[in-house]
Amino acid sequence: MDDMFKEALELVKAQATVRAMTAEEMTAMVGTLAKSLQALSQPVVEPAGAVPAAIAKVDAAKSIRETAVTCLECGKVCKIITGKHLALHGLDADTYREKWGLKKGTPLACKALARARRKKMKEMQLWERRKSAAGAKPKADEAAPATGKVAKAATAKPKGRPKKA
Ligand SMILES: [Zn+2]
C-alpha cells in the first residue's frame, strides 16, 4: 500500500468517526482521495506556452534588440511596434509595456532607431532653444541696434527671396 492510500485511509477513517458510512462509501472515498492526493503530489507541469513571469520579463527586455524589436503579443519582428499594430492586440504602448513588465517610457523600437530618434529629438530641442534664444533678445536689440538689425535681416532673407523670384 503506498503512502497516498494510507493517507486517504486515515482521512476516511476520520470521516467515518464523524458520520456513519457504508463500506462502499468508504472504499469509494479512499479511491477518490488517493487519486486526488496523488494528483496533488505530482510536480506541477507548466502547460506548453505558459512562461513563468520572471522569464517573461527577461524576454520582454530581450525583445528590443539593436536592429529589430519583437512584438511580444504575436512574435512579429519589426523595426518599431506602432500604435496601430498594438491596437490589433487591443493594447496601446502603455498597456503593452505594463503587461510585459517593460519600464515606463521604453521606446517600442529597435535600439538603433530609438537612438537615432533620441538624437533627432536632442537636435530639435537645441534648435528650439536656439530659436527661442534668438527671439528673446529684444532688449539686446535696444542696447545694440546694429547687431539686432543684422540678425533680423539674416532671418528675413529666406522669407523675402521667394517673393522676389
Ligand atoms: Zn503583434
Image: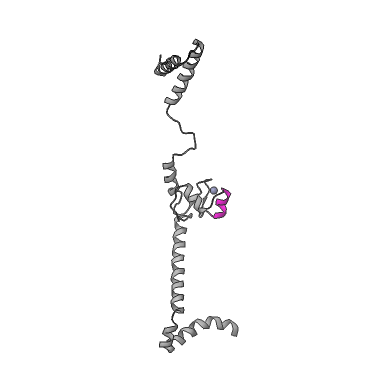
Quarter assignment of residue 138: bottom left
Judge whether residue 140 can be spotted in this image: yes
- 82 left or right of 66 in image: right
Q: Position of residue 43 (x, y in %)?
A: 42, 28
How many marks overall? 0
Q: Nearer the viewer, residue 11 or 158?
A: 11
Q: Position of residue 162 (x, y in %)?
A: 58, 81
**Which of the image's four quarters has the N terminus?**
top left
Quarter assignment of residue 118: bottom left
Q: What residue is at 44 percent from the left and 64 percent from the top?
A: 119
Above or below for 159 versus 115: below
Judge whether residue 165 can be spotted in this image: no
Q: What residue is at 43 percent from the left and 45 percent from the top?
A: 57
Q: Is residue 148 magenta?
A: no
Q: Nearer the viewer, residue 1 or 72?
A: 1
Q: Residue furthest top?
A: 23
Colour mapping: one colour
Instruction: Look at the image and give the residue range highlighted in magenta.
Output: 82-89
Q: Position of residue 139 (x, y in %)?
A: 42, 84
Above or below for 49 versus 127: above
Q: Position of residue 135 (x, y in %)?
A: 46, 79
Above or below for 162 versus 34: below
Which secondary structure type mostly characterizes the magenta part of the structure? helix
Quarter assignment of residue 111: bottom left
Q: Nearer the viewer, residue 135 or 120?
A: 135
